[in-house]
Image (tube, rainbow, N blue to C red):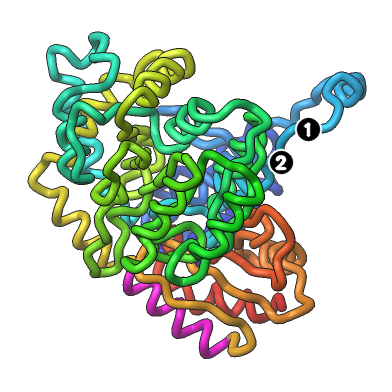
Amino acid sequence: MENGSSVQRVTASLRELAGTLAPGAKLPSSRRLVADLGVGPVTVQRAIDSLVADGTVLTRPGAGTFVARATRTATVDTDWQRVALGDSPVRTEGVAAALTVPTHDVLDMARGYLDLSLQPSSRLASAMARAARRPEAWTVPAPNGVPELRTWFAQQLGADHEDVFISPGGQGALSTVLRSIVPAGSPVLVAVPGYPGVISLLRSAGLVPVPVPTDTDGVRPELLERAFEQSGARLLYLQPTYANPDGSVLSPERRRPVLEIAARAGAFVVEDDFARWLGHGSTPPPSLLRDDTDGRVITVNSLSKVSGPSLRVGCIVSRGPVAQRIAGLSFVDHLIVARPLQEAAVELVTGAGWNAHLRALSAALGARMNTLSTELARQLPGCGFHRPRGGFSLWLRLPRGVDDLEVARRTRERGLAVGPGRHYVVAEEDAAHLRLCYAAITEQQIPTAVRILAESL
């Protein structure tokens, strides 16, 4: 991947050049820019992409790059919508921030997706090409998914393939599962700090998230039991393996007590297993399905975190009557998962290079986490954190009295995007935090990112 500072420098030069030209004027060719600026063609293209994204220039295939013309948009009075909409039933700031793509001049430690250098891009392209050539690729798939893909997920999770239902990614699966189990207005226990997407999802469905604190060993059983007793909840959501945002793992000593507490409450347990293949060299613990004897655990898994964010293919594993309910609502929500995507997923995960990709990814994430931990200890000794054993993010505790939103604003002004911690909790916390993702940034950029963070405190 090209050096970020080179892209920033070329972007600034081209922006300055565009400012001296009239709208519609043509910029020099990419070949000329490579020669004049002394950089590679990839760097020039990334700089042009950045300028296209912010509307400075536009490209015409076969013709070149041109200065964009200023457009005038008629002013529309939409204040009536404020009255019609009323108060928003859900806050989506954390989800929106996690999906917003920073410009190329901003170091990205906010998004929980793999940097391009970590994605198996060539394997994805080959898998899509092979899948598209399959005779059945454009036909309607089986309602519960392509059999080969269901079998693969079953083998990975220790499940029966008959219990596997293919879903359009993890978020779509969680939406269907959570709404299938309990009606609007019901409380749902959520391990916190936790995934902001599920907190927003619960609120948008009219469900009430109830926080259950975690530590480095996962959800705390004594607090979980108290939360069930006080709330009357019949559903627990947690990420037992490399949780987002702190990378915690539910310890072997807590697995059975957690399931026993849920059983006494007559509750389902939704296991979000999104990070199964994101360990840092260690073997991940088995899915909670292994210890489930009565169909209590519903597991959601996805390929997008370990491959590419646009491979929206995942699965739901469930048993008993709840499986029929989940399938029915999924049909209403999504009808089917596009067969070409399912076939491409089969090609990808059964291909010869898949295990090599997982090994390389594990090593790269571990190296980035080690570098981040070292730099934080060196440059920010007043902040606290635990080294995650897997996942893609580190949960940084800020000094007392520091505001996470203000720090995030300052870092953004200096060229670094981070995740404010308040998006990952349900209620007030005793200290502010930041989520620092190390998957979307190169290892070489991490010292600079930590320096910017230190300057922003």
Q: Residue at x 12, y 39 (%)?
A: 350
Please, is residue 40 above or below residue 269 in the view? below
Label 1 and label 2: CA atoms lie apart by 7 Å
Please, is residue 79 above or below residue 231 in the view? above
Residue that lies at the very extreme toward the top in this rendered image = 139
Question: Residue type at mark 2?
Answer: Arg
Question: Residue type at mark 1?
Answer: Ser
The main secondary structure of the magenta stretch is helix
Q: Could you say which disc has been placed on residue 91 in the image?
A: 2
- Are dots 1 and 2 in contact, CB under 8 Å? yes
Of residue 2 and residue 234, the one placed in the foreground of this image is 234
Magenta part of the chain: 366-379
- Mark 1: secondary structure: loop
Q: Is residue 377 magenta?
A: yes
Q: Quadrant of residue 201?
A: top right
Q: Could you say which disc has been placed on residue 88 in the image?
A: 1
